[in-house]
Amino acid sequence: MEVLSDLNTFAKILTDKGYNGYFHTQGAYPGKLKDSISEYLENCRNGTEGTPKPVLLVTGYLQWAGEDKPHVQCSMWVKHLNGKFFLNKMEVKRKDQYGHLLKQSELTNLSVVNAPKVREAIALVSDAPKQQVVPKGRGFRH
């Protein structure tokens, strides 16, 4: 299901789902989701960046607790056509403090409407909580 929306609507839907951190569009232009994409497209219009790509790579962290802790990164492939934007694909990765991949999930055939909330995206690459084994009783003690 494709849902085409302008940049304001696109960014608002994702921000409401918790994608409210800082992102990079095409590896540069740090800022909030809407600002990052807008700045990239503006630089394409004024000739600094060249011709805009039909699919933009927008990356950011969904979970960060410091350089010495594991973190969750998100990459979104955002198609844009005639001022309309839609989410094409999303990749969520959990990496350790050294940058080694721990777990990865790829979501395709997405729309901005059915994209997971940030909590759900993080859960896709988080380890399920381990069940604790309750020790058996040793019987009656005298």
Image: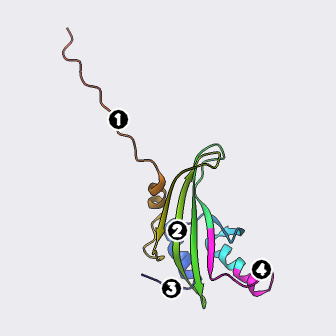
Measured along the vertical axis of the image, is residue 45 above or below residue 25? below
Measured as percent of width and height from the top left, residue 137 is found at 24, 22
Where, quadrant-wise, is the C terminus in this rendering?
Answer: top left
Residue found 47% across the figure and 61% down from its top: 121
Looking at the rendering, the stretch of residues picked out in magenta corresponds to 41-58
Where, quadrant-wise, is the N terminus in this rendering?
Answer: bottom left
Measured along the vertical axis of the image, is residue 17 above or below residue 128? below
Disc 1 target residue = 132
Model colouring: rainbow
Disc 2 target residue = 90
Closer to the N terminus: mark 4 or mark 3? 3
Going by the image, does 122 lie left or right of 37? Answer: left
Measured as percent of width and height from the top left, residue 11 is found at 56, 76
Amino acid bearing label 3 = Leu
Which label was assigned to residue 4?
3
Whole-number angstrom distance, CA of label 1 to CA of label 4: 54 Å
Measured as percent of width and height from the top left, residue 3 is found at 47, 83
- Graded by Cα atoms within 10 Å as few (under 14), some (14 to 19) or many (20 or more), the crowding at tag 1 reads few
Amino acid bearing label 4 = Glu
Q: Is residue 28 magenta?
A: no
Residue found 59% across the figure and 84% down from its top: 80
Amino acid bearing label 1 = Gln
Closer to the N terminus: mark 1 or mark 3? 3
Element marked by disc 4: loop
Going by the image, does 38 lie left or right of 16? Answer: right
Disc 4 target residue = 49
Closer to the N terminus: mark 4 or mark 2? 4
Q: Residue furthest top?
A: 142
